[in-house]
Amino acid sequence: MRRQRIVVKIGSSSLTNEKGGIDQQKLDEHVHALVALREANHEVILVSSGAVAAGFRGLGYSSRPVTLKGKQAAAAIGQSMLIQTYIEKFSAFDITVALLLLTRDDFSDRERYRNAYATMTELLERGAIPIINENDTVSVEELTFGDNDMLSALVSGFIHADQLIILTDINGIYNGNPRTNPAAVKYDYLDGITEEMIQDTDTTGSKVGTGGMKSKLIAAKTATMLGVPVFIGYGEGQDKLIQVLQGNGDGTYIASPSKAPINTRKQWIALHSEAMGGIYVDKGAEEAISNQGSSLLSAGILKISGTFEKGDVVQVYGMHDLLGKGEISCSSDELQRTIKSHSDREKVTPSIEVIHRDGWVSVQKIGEALS
C-alpha cells in the first residue's frame, strides 16, 4: 500500500463514557489503530473531540453544559486531561504528539493560516502526530467551526490529505435513521453528498457530543469538494483504520468528484477570506476569466466598490451575477486611476493584470465547497 496522508476524526461519543469521563478502553483501541497506520508508513493527523465531555464532571456538572461559559470551563479542564492521556499512550510506542488548538480566526487570517499549515507539515516531517481540536476555551459562537467534523474537513483539505476517516458510533450513512427505522438501508459507497441528503438527515448528536450525522454529511461534502475522499463509519480492533484504507471498513465510502485537490491558496480564498471590495467587469472579461482560464485585466473592468490593498480578496461581478473571488494585485486607488486612464481617449494606457488566474476561484467552485 502506498504511503498516504490520513486525517482521522474521533468524536466525543467514540472517546468517552456516558458519565463524561475518558473511556480508557476506547482510547487504547484508537491509539493502537493510529499506531498501526504509522507502522504501515502512513502520515497521521488526528482531529480529536472529547475535551468538553471529558472535563464537565470535574466542574460538578451532571451532564454536558449548555452555556458557553460552562463549555469553555469544561474544555479548559478536559483538554489538559485528554492531551496528557494521548502523550502517555503514544509515548509507549516512541511516538511524539503535538497539540494544535484552532479557531475560525486561524483560518480567516491569512498569516495564521499559513503558519498553521507550516507547523503541521513540519510536525509530519519530524515524525510527530498532530492532534487537533477546536480551541473551545476561547471560541465564541461566530468564530467556531460548528463542530469538529467541519474542522476535520477543512484540515484534510488544506493539508492535502489522501483520506479523511470520520469515526462515529453508527456504521455509516443510511437512507433513514437506523435507530428508529429497522428498514433503513446503509450506503456502502456514494459518489457524493447531495443537498437533499443533508436536509433529510437528523441533526441529533450524542449525549456527550455536538454533532450528528447531518454535520458529518456537510463535512464530507466540503472535504470531497476539496479533493479528499471520505469514510464515515464505525470500527473495532487495532486494525480498523488499516481495514478502512483497504476498502473493508464498516461504514460508507464517499468519493471525491475533484480530479485534483484545490491548492492551499485557493482554498483560503474560497472558504476563509473576507472580501474587501467588488469589481464589475464587461462581457469580454467575464468570458475570459470564466471560460478561458485567463487572468483579469484592467481593460475589462467597468467600475469598483470598496477600499482594498494589494493582496486583499475581492468579489468579481459580471453583467448579471457574481463570478467569483480573487486576490487583487493592486490597491483600489491604483486600480481606479488605471480605469480612468483607459477612458481617456488622449492617452494610450496599457492594461495591467488585476487578478492572476492562480489567485482566482470561480463562484461555482466556492458554491460546491460551501453548500
Image (spheres, rainbow, N blue to C red):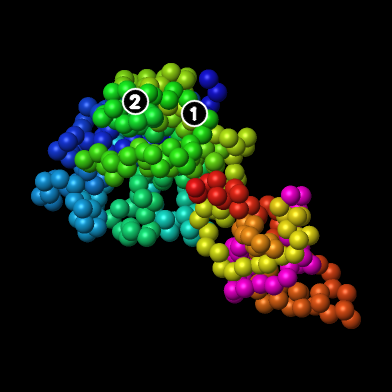
The amino acid beneath tag 1 is Leu
User: Considering depth in this image, is 135 or 350 the residue closer to the camera?
Assistant: 350
Residue 252: x %, y % from top left: 42, 27
Vertical relation: 357 (above or below) 99: below
Number of numbered labels in the structure image = 2
The amino acid beneath tag 2 is Ala
* Rendering quarter of residue 305: bottom right
Give me the residue at 49% from left, 38% from top: 194
Count residues near mark 1 (Cα–Cα under 10 Å), then give few for <14, some for 14-19, many for 20+: some
Taking the magenta stretch, the answer to whether it contains residue 287 is: no
Give me the residue at 65% from left, 54% from top: 360
User: Considering depth in this image, is 210 or 268 the residue closer to the camera?
Assistant: 210
Q: Which residues are magenta?
A: 291-315
User: Considering depth in this image, is 167 or 178 the residue closer to the camera?
Assistant: 178
Give me the residue at 26% from left, 36% from top: 13
Q: Horizontal placement of 5 versus 75: left or right? A: right
- The disc placed on residue 184 is 2
The residue beneath circle 1 is 190
Residue 9: x %, y % from top left: 38, 36
Which of the two discs, 1 and 2, sits closer to the camera? Answer: 2
> What secondary structure is marked by label 1?
strand
> What secondary structure is marked by label 2?
loop
Q: Horizontal placement of 183 versus 229: left or right? A: left
Give the CA distance from mark 1 to mark 2: 16 Å
- The disc placed on residue 77 is none
Closer to the N terminus: mark 1 or mark 2? 2
Res. 34 visible in picture: no
Vertical relation: 144 (above or below) 88: below
Residue 333: x %, y % from top left: 67, 77
